Amino acid sequence: EVQLVQSGAEVKKPGESLRISCKGSGYSFTSYWISWVRQMPGKGLQWMGRIDSSDSYTNYSPSFQGHVIMSVDKSINTAYLEWSSLKASDTAIYYCARGNSYGFVFDYWGQGTRVTVSS
Amino acid sequence: DIQMTQSPSSLSASGGDRVTITCQASQDIRDSLNWYQQKPGKAPKLLIYGASNLQTGVPSRFSGSGSGTHLTFTISSLQPEDIATYYCQQYAYLPLTFGGGTKVEIK
């Protein structure tokens, strides 16, 4: 069974750093891209970018380029999303999703990680 | 970025009704469109890929059609379990973009 299991909810202060994770199982992890999708409170879905799990090649949305870093650790089938300095506007649920068909079709999703940034 | 204008933003229909949602793309995206369903408090779920292909395990009352700049999603007979928000997502161009969502409710 394909699963993406994300790390738990986080509460942080502005300016703090954070890394959340997404562990894949039940499939060949390096054969698929992982995308990250943001959902701000009560709002729609925003694609942040994606990473090729085989070689860590990334595509970032211009809206998120320079504010987050995506990475993978192939040895433990885990993708990461990282911030070096959080803002209150980063408060959201973050989903990882497996990208099928050249990484463009999100056929499996993680359960989401809720990030709250507040002073 | 490709803008995906989804309409309506919300709708209320009776059980058994036919429901249609449209996505208008700001540029020709051919058939590079997926549809997702998101229930409250849950992650999105893929329903339709490549504009018209039903994902494995998804009921046949869901369908998609169209290409170019005007694409549609249909529920042929609305069921109580279909209450959710539906999103389109284009993948013809990077960055990938989603429509704003359509919230479907039962009358």
Image (cartoon, rainbow, N blue to C red):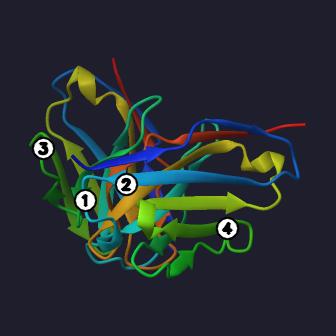
CB under 8 Å between discs 3 and 2: no
In screen coordinates, is B77 left or right of A72?
A: left
The disc numbered 3 marks a residue on which chain?
B
Determine the CA span between mark 3 and mark 4. Answer: 34 Å
Please tell me how crowded label 1 is: few (under 14), some (14-19), or many (20+) other residues with Cα within 10 Å: few
The mark found on residue B57 in the picture is: 3
Tag nearer the camera, 4 or 2 = 2
Determine the CA span between mark 1 and mark 2. Answer: 7 Å
Please tell me how crowded label 2 is: few (under 14), some (14-19), or many (20+) other residues with Cα within 10 Å: many
Residue found at x 54% / y 43%: A7
Quick one: quadrant of the C terminus of chain B?
top left
Residue found at x 46% / y 56%: B99
Q: Mark 4 is on which residue type? A: Phe
Tag nearer the camera, 1 or 3 = 1
**Residue A71 sits above or below residue B43 on the image:** below
CB under 8 Å between discs 3 and 4: no
Q: Which residue in the rendered view is the most extreme toward the top?
A: B107
Q: Mark 3 is on which residue type? A: Gly
Quadrant hosting residue B72: bottom left
**What residue sits right under mark 1 in the picture?**
A27
- Nearer the observer, A87 or B58: A87
Where residue B102 sits in the image (x, y, percent)? 42, 42
Determine the CA span between mark 4 and mark 1. Answer: 28 Å
Determine the CA span between mark 1 and mark 3. Answer: 18 Å
Where residue B101 sits in the image (x, y, percent)? 46, 46
**What residue sits right under mark 4 in the picture?**
A64
Where residue B68 sits in the image (x, y, percent)? 30, 75
Where residue A10 sits in the image (x, y, percent)? 68, 38
Determine the CA span between mark 4 and mark 2. Answer: 23 Å
